[in-house]
Amino acid sequence: MADTYTKEETQSFKVGACVAVVILALIGYKSLTANEVEHADNGTYYSLDARFGRTDGLLVGDAVRMAGVTIGKVVGARLDDHFNAIMTLDIKEGVQIPDDSSASIVSSGILGSKYIEIEPGGSLDNLQPGGEFSYTQDAMVIEELLDRIISIGKANRNPSDKNEKVENKDEKASSEQNFDFDM
């Protein structure tokens, strides 16, 4: 028995298939161009490198900020021979960064995206294009931070618990010694 479809069902199937093809084409195009990072302002940029032990959550395309102002973007990520992450940053031309500045990976809140915050140093000499930050601070992982807070809380709580137990044992021992029962 052959299935027959009405004209409306056939037309709905064709429209659905066309929509699916368009969506797949858009996804394919987006995935092919995802590695290309474009800046919002078309200007000239120079590249700097920053070496981190871990970059959890920092992605190519994330912002580079100084004093809260966006001055560039992360445009590349690679590993060195010692398995450190080298992030390549494009910085707006005209923004001078002292050579003793530091680059830190920070987040925009508890669950916010990550970005690189540059803390300017006091040197009169500036980083040159292609240069590298001497001072960096890795990303803080929320789970590790919570584990540290919990362990500090436990450590602070435990000594008092032990002191209370020792005091209770001393009180119990002294009360047992004070009473002499004659039988």
Image (cartoon, rainbow, N blue to C red):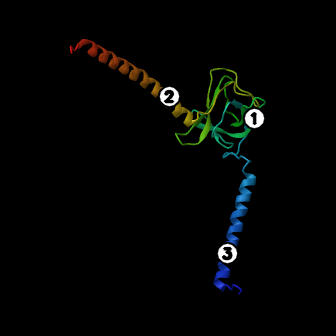
Where is residue 151 shown, x and y percent of the image? 50, 28
Q: Nearer the viewer, residue 176 or 152?
A: 176
Q: Quadrant of residue 165?
A: top left
Where is residue 62 shown, x and y percent of the image? 65, 42
Image quadrant occupied by the N terminus: bottom right
Mark 1 touching mark 2, by CB under 8 A? no
Q: Nearer the viewer, residue 157 or 108?
A: 157
Select label 3 or label 1 by which is in front. 1
Visible residue check, residue 173: yes
Check disc 2 and report the residue beneath it.
Answer: 151
Visible residue check, residue 68: no
Where is residue 78 shown, x and y percent of the image? 75, 37
Check disc 1 and report the residue beneath it.
Answer: 79
The residue type indicated by label 1 comes to Leu
Q: Residue placed at 66% from the left, 33% from the top?
A: 54
* Mark 2 vs mark 3, CA separation in Å: 59 Å
Residue 15 tag number: 3
Q: Residues within 10 Å of mark 1 (few under 14, many from 20)?
A: few
Where is residue 178 shown, x and y percent of the image? 24, 12
Decide if residue 67 is on the left or right side of residue 6.
left
Figure check: 90 above or below 100: below
Q: Residue placed at 72% from the left, 67% from the top?
A: 21
Count all numbered tags in the image, as a single digit: 3
* Mark 1 vs mark 2, CA separation in Å: 32 Å
